Image (tube, rainbow, N blue to C red):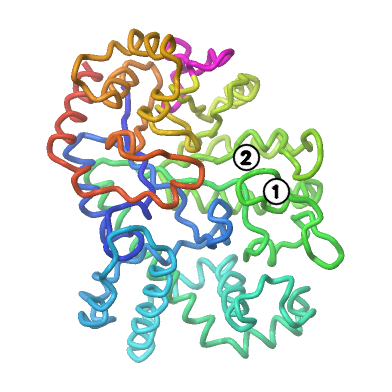
Amino acid sequence: MKTSGIFLPIHSLPSKHGTGGFEEAKKFITFLATARQECWQTGTIHPTNFEQQFCVTSVFAGNPLYIDFQQLVQDGLIKQKDYDNWCSRSHLDWKYSTLRTSQLVFYAFKTFIRERPTEGYLEFVAKNKYWLDDYCLFNALKAHFTDASWDNWQDEDIRKRTPQALAYYTDLLSDEIELYKFEQFLFFSQWQRLKENLHQKRISLFGTLPFYVAYDSADCWANQKLFMLKDDLTPSVLVDTAGQPVAYNWKNMKQENFSWWQQRLQRANQLFDAFVVENFSHFHSYPIYGKRGRKSADWSVVSLFAGQRAKVVAEDFSVDSKLSRLVLKEKAIYTTTAQQKAFVKGAKRHQLKNHKEKSVAYLSASNTNSVYDWYSSLSKNTQKEVLQLINSATGEKLSWSFIKYLYTTKAEIVMLRMHELANNLSNSCDSIWQYMAQNKDFSAQNAEKLKQLCEDAKK
C-alpha cells in the first residue's frame, strides 16, 4: 500500500522567532493528519554553523534553535515576558534565532539549577555520555576561545586532546558544560514528545543522516584519527561538495570496525522511524577538492545499514543507474527518484514506469528548482512533452498536475516537498536554508486535495 508524506525542514516552519521549531510543528502535524499524510521528513535536526549549513557540527546533538520556549513558559522555567521579548521576526533569520535561543536557554537553566536536576535529566546525561561530554566541552571551548575554529585555539594540548588538558578544561568550564547538557536535554525531551504526537496520529518520522560533518565540529575534534588531517591538525583533504567538509580516513575507520558509524546508526534508530542518508553515493567514491577524479571510499560500511529497525533510504538523484543497482542489492535499503530528472537524457531510472517498489519518489531533488521554475526553463518542445505526459488539466496549477502524476508511481513512498505543494520557492542549492513556509500553505483546501489524492491512490 502506497505511503505519502511531506518534506519540510523544521527551520522552514512558519515562525516569528527567526526559525521554525517544535512550537510551530504542532500546527503542521495537524495539517498532515487532516491531509492523510503518513510521514514527515524533517530535514537535518543537527546543529550547523552559518558558514557551512550543509555540514553539521555534531551528528549526535540536536539543534537548540528548534526548542519550544512557549513550553518552557508553561513548565515554569522561563517567564512569559522574557518569551514575548523575542517575538519579532516574520522571515528566516538564523543569527536572531541563535541570540534568542542562547538567552532563553540561559534563563531556563538558572531556574532548573535552583530547583535541582530531575531524575530524567540525570538519566539523559548518563545514557548519552558517549557523545554528550565531548559535544558540550567542545561548545564550551568554542566560547572560551572566542568562537575560533578548534585548530586556532590558543592551547595546543586541548587541540590535541591530552588527558591533562581535557581534565583541566572540563573543571574550568564545568558550568558552561552543564548548560549545554541542559540544552540538549530540553531538545531531546521535546523531540520525544513530537515523535509521540506524530505516532498518535499514525504519522512516521523521517529524519536525515548527514554524510559529512564540518571540520570545525565536535565530531572531528573528538575523533581526529577518523579524518584526513595534517600534523598541525588542519584538513589535508577537502571534499568538493556543499561546505567542502574534511574527508574521512576510511582506513582508520575500518580498523575500528566503523564503530563511529555504528553509533550513528544506533542513534538514528532511536530518533527516527526512517532516515534518508545524504550523499549515499559517496560511500562508493567521493570528489576531492582541487584534484581530478574521485577518491575511493569504503562500500563495505553499507552492510551496517542492513537490518536496521528504521527504514533506510539512500539519497541518490544522479542520472547514472550504477549506484541504484548497487543499492538494490542491499535489499533493506530504499532508493530515491526525482521526476524532474526523468526528462534528462539517459535518466531512465527516474521515469515513472521504471520506479522500483522499494523506493521513495520525489518531484525534485533537494538542490533543484521548484516545478514551476524548472518547467519555465525548458524548451517549448520539451514543455509540450511534459504537459502531455502528466496530463495537465486546463487551469490547474502545474505543481498539482505533477503531484497527481507522481501519485501514480509504483514506488512505496511518495514524498512531496512543501514548497512544491505551495509552488512558491526557487529552490536553489543555498536557498533552502532561507525558505520559510507560510501559514496559508497549510490551508484546508490543500489538505483536502491531498487527502483525496491519498484515498484515490489506495483504491
**Stretch in magenta:** 342-362
Q: Amino acid at mark 2?
A: Leu
Mark 1 and mark 2 lie on one chain; the one further toward the N terminus is 1
Distance (Cα) linking label 1 and label 2: 9 Å
- Describe the element under mark 1 as helix, strand or loop: loop
Q: Compared with residue 106, is residue 302 higher up or lower down, i.e. above or below?
A: above
Left or right: where does residue 190 sit relative to residue 131?
left
Q: Compared with residue 226, is residue 306 higher up or lower down, i.e. above or below?
A: above
Q: Check contact, mark 1 vs mark 2: CB within 8 A.
A: yes
Q: Relative to the observer, which residue lies in front, 90 or 260? A: 90
User: Which residue bears the numbered disc 1?
Assistant: 258
User: Which residue bears the numbered disc 2?
Assistant: 304
Q: Relative to the observer, which residue lies in front, 288 or 59? A: 288
Image coordinates of residue 188 in percent, x first then y, are 40, 63
Image coordinates of residue 374 in percent, x first then y, are 42, 27
Q: Amino acid at mark 1?
A: Phe
